[in-house]
Amino acid sequence: MICFFAPSFSVVDIQCVVRLPLSGNLLSFYIDPEMVRKREIFKAIKEGFNLFDREGKGVCDVREIGTIVRHLGICPTEIELRDMITEIEEEEPTGFIAFERFERMMSRILLENQYPRDSEEKLLRAFRTLDPDNKGYVEAEKIRTLLTTHGERFSQEEIDDFLHFAVDAETGLCHYEDYVMQVAT
């Protein structure tokens, strides 16, 4: 295996490309899909973390970890999130999480697909249970009530953020098929 270097390539780019000799002077390039996936995951983790590393010191407030994790498409329960934080906190908690610890944990979680996303069909079935008349929508207040009274409780901010994204502001309705299509892509 012979690697090549170019000024615009990072170390990870170089690891992703392997030069394979063919007959004669022709060369073919093979891009390792697993390395590309690892590179994309690292980039997403770094970008998400950097949103909350306000001073660029490689640390972020422990209270932001849930937001970063969800930004990466992982939706753990509060208990699972506390377990994640416990895993990456220093022996003596400082209130801050180092990027290196966060990146190591999130890479493992994302590469092993420990929290697979629900399928579109599963999401639609869940919404349809709230829509027994099969109208194609659910009222925002019905969703708010459900999220504050059943199962794992969501914070008011989380509920407001969800409803702001999922509900038509003019009608106060969540047209769930449209919503599922938006989050599935």
Image (spheres, rainbow, N blue to C red):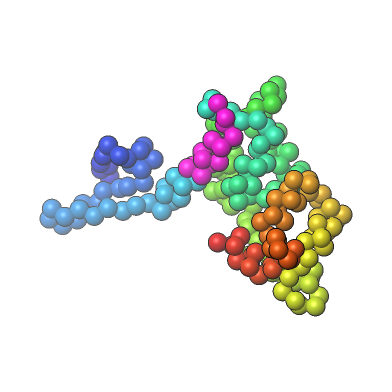
Q: Verify whether residue 107 appears in magenta.
A: no
Q: Nearer the viewer, residue 169 or 84?
A: 169
| Residue at 74% over, 51% down | 160
User: Where residue 76 sits in the image (x, y, percent)?
Assistant: 70, 48
Q: Position of 98 compared to 79: left or right?
A: left
Residue 38 visible in the snapshot: no
Q: Which residue is farthest front?
A: 170
User: Where residue 105 sits in the image (x, y, percent)?
Assistant: 59, 39
User: Where residue 110 sits in the image (x, y, percent)?
Assistant: 57, 48
Decide whether the magenta segment is chiefly helix, strand or loop: helix
Give the total of numbered labels: 0
Q: Verify whether residue 45 appears in magenta.
A: yes
| Residue at 82% over, 62% down | 142
In the depicted structure, whether residue 60 falls above or below residue 170 = above
Instruction: Choose top left, top right, bottom left or bottom right for residue 85.
Output: top right
Q: Which residue is farthest right?
A: 149
Q: Quadrant of the N terminus?
A: top left
| Residue at 72% over, 56% down | 163
Q: Quadrant of the C terminus?
A: bottom right
Q: Nearer the viewer, residue 114 or 131?
A: 131
Residue 48 visible in the snapshot: yes
Q: Nearer the viewer, residue 149 or 141?
A: 141
In the depicted structure, whether residue 9 falls above or below residue 176 = above
User: Where residue 90 sits in the image (x, y, percent)?
Assistant: 66, 25
Instruction: Choose top left, top right, bottom left or bottom right for residue 4.
Output: top left
Q: Position of 17 compared to 96: left or right?
A: left
* Start-end of magenta stretch: 42-55
In the depicted structure, whether residue 178 falls above or below residue 14 = below
Q: Which residue is farthest left?
A: 24
